[in-house]
């Protein structure tokens, strides 16, 4: 990965996911059936010292995706 080679290795990835009504543009681009929400995912990847090194925004058809979360008890 280029960022790792430049001294910014990924250490933590944080996703924030929300569901909402799509915009008209998203409705057309995703070819959504009527009345379905979209999922919006904001992903921030952090390197050392909590420095953000990558940000991604994704919008997905809500009826086509499933989210899975895993937690460990510390």
Image (cartoon, rainbow, N blue to C red):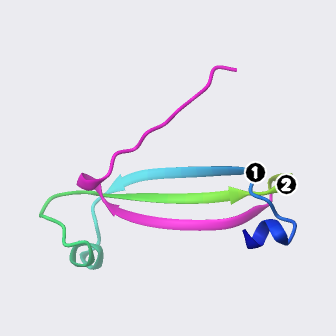
Q: Specify few, some or many for label 1: CA neighbours under 10 Å numbering under 14, 14-19, or 20 or more.
A: some
Q: How far from the left and from the top, in percent, is residue 34?
A: 12, 63
Q: Is residue 29 above or below residue 43?
A: below
For marks 1 and 2, the one nearer the N-term is 1
Residue at figure coordinates x 40%, y 44% from the top left: 67
| Residue in the foreground of this view, choosing between 25 and 7 | 7
Q: Position of residue 43 (x, y in %)?
A: 57, 58
Q: Residue at x 75, y 73 (%)?
A: 2
Residue closest to the eye, 69 or 40: 69
* Residue 9: image location, x then y, percent: 79, 59
Q: Say left or right for 7 vs 14.
A: right
Pick the quarter of the image with the C terminus: top right
Residue under the point 43% across and 39% down = 68
Label 2 sits on a secondary structure element that is helix
Q: Horizontally, is 38 left or right of 4 in the view?
A: left
Per the rendering, the mark at residue 11 is 1
Q: Position of residue 63 (x, y in %)?
A: 23, 53
Residue placed furthest toward the top? 73
Q: Is 21 included in the stretch rendered in magenta? A: no
In this rendering, is residue 70 above or below 14? above
Query: Quick one: label 2, few (<14), some, or many (20+) residues within 10 Å?
Result: few
Q: Residue at x 65, y 51 (%)?
A: 13
Residue that mark 2 sits on: 48
Residues tagged 1 and 2 counted as in contact (Cβ below 8 A): yes
Residue 23 to residue 21: above or below: below
Would residue 39 appear left or right of 74 to someone viewing this image?
A: left
Q: Quadrant of the N terminus?
A: bottom right
* Mark 1: secondary structure: loop
Residue range of the region highlighted in magenta in the rendering: 51-74
């Amino acid at each position: 990965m280029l960022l790792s080679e430049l001294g910014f290795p990924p250490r933590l990835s944080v996703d924030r996911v929300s569901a909402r009504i799509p915009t008209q543009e998203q409705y057309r681009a995703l070819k959504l059936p009527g009345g379905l929400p979209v999922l919006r995912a904001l992903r921030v990847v952090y390197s050392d010292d909590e420095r953000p090194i990558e940000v991604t925004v994704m919008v997905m058809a809500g009826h086509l995706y499933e989210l899975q979360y895993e937690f460990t008890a510390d």
